[in-house]
Amino acid sequence: MDASTDGDRGTTGQPHGDEADGHHLSRKTVLRAAVAAGVALPVAMMGVPALARTVGANGEPVELTPACDDGDDPTPPQTEGPYFKPNSPRRTSLVDAGTPGTRLTVTGYVFGLACLPLGNVLMDFWQADVNGVYDNAGYRFRGHQFTNPDGTFTLTTIVPGLYPGRTRHIHVKLQAPGRPVLTTQLYFPGEPRNNTDSIFDPRLLMEVRTVGGGREARFDFVLNVPQSTTTRPTTTTTPSSPGGGTWAAGTTYAIGAIVTHNGVGYVCLQGHLAQPGWEPPNVPALWRAE
Ligand SMILES: [Fe+2]
């Protein structure tokens, strides 16, 4: 590869992060975590054959995306590259009816270190268009969104085009409330350039399948967000109806729990053990007004 054409290496020449050991992904582990957390699993997650994470472009085993099972393997960082722009529009779809390119939907979860889903995580995506060109004047193929209370996200876009020096990829920044930003990239299996791109990291391969004329991809992120098992969502303390409980320190609240505080109703965005000072609306990462 001609490094001089590798526009995504940026001016620092920062290599891709490879300090963390990969772990073999256990779909069962992820499913167990999701089920334990009371998360409704998307249909796309059930019964989908393992694709990207089982074999590399040449049939060799690949180092797999960190499994969300032992609490010490966050998703690896990658260089930002030269094309990030702040202040992207808030949207989950980067396309309209006339946008050229193969339609791509990316779905998945964002977990913390204890494999509990993280809601309200900022995700800022940017990518090249079908011709491998970034829009540096406007915001085409740029957009940010927040994970749902159950930690899920969906991005509707196109398969990005190739440009010199890089394999096919999508850029993303993630930030849980009050936590550092993770900057990384997502990759596609079976791409010839995966073997020659020095930034490429197989732990960041998405699972991709063809559906009709488009593609469906999925990837689960693990952020370096400490989580205690005491924050594991539980239904035992969930009020059964809106206004069914008054916020109280020392109570374990689950995602979706509804409380009242000072006469206002709030819905819980992240499971947690309520502490003094965390009452709504003081902590927007935990409570949203109904
Ligand atoms: Fe790029």
Image (spheres, rainbow, N blue to C red):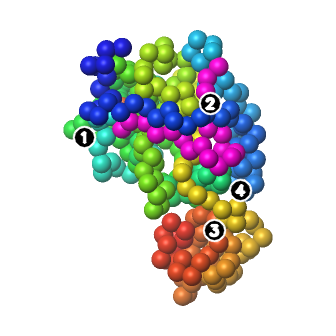
Q: Residues within 10 Å of mark 4 (few under 14, many from 20)?
A: many
Residue 272: mark in rendering: 3
Front residue (pair 179, 213): 179
Dot 2 or dot 4: first in sequence order is 4
**Amino acid type assigned to the residue bearing label 4 in the image:** Ala
Residue found at the very far left of the displayed protein? 137
Q: Which residue is mark 1?
A: 138
Inspect the image, locate mark 3, and give the three-letter code of the amino acid beneath it.
His
Residue 281 percent across, percent down from the top left: 49, 77
Q: The residue under label 1 is which amino acid type? A: Gly
State how far apart marks 4 and 3 are (Cα). Answer: 12 Å
The answer to whether 138 is drawn above or below residue 168 in the figure is below
- Residue 64 is marked as 2
Residue situated furthest top in the rendering: 58
Provide residue 168's location: percent of width, then percent of height.
43, 24
Q: Quadrant of residue 62?
A: top right
Magenta segment's dominant SS is loop
Give the Cα distance between marks 1 and 2.
35 Å
**Looking at the image, which residue is at 42% across and 22% down?**
198
Q: Which residues are magenta?
A: 61-80
Going by the numbered disc 2, the residue's amino acid type is: Leu
Residue 73 falls within the magenta-colored stretch: yes
* Marks 4 and 1, the one that precedes in the sequence: 4
Contact flag, marks 1 and 2 (Cβ < 8 Å): no
Labels 3 and 2 touching (C-beta < 8 A): no
Which residue is at 44% across, 15% downward?
Answer: 196
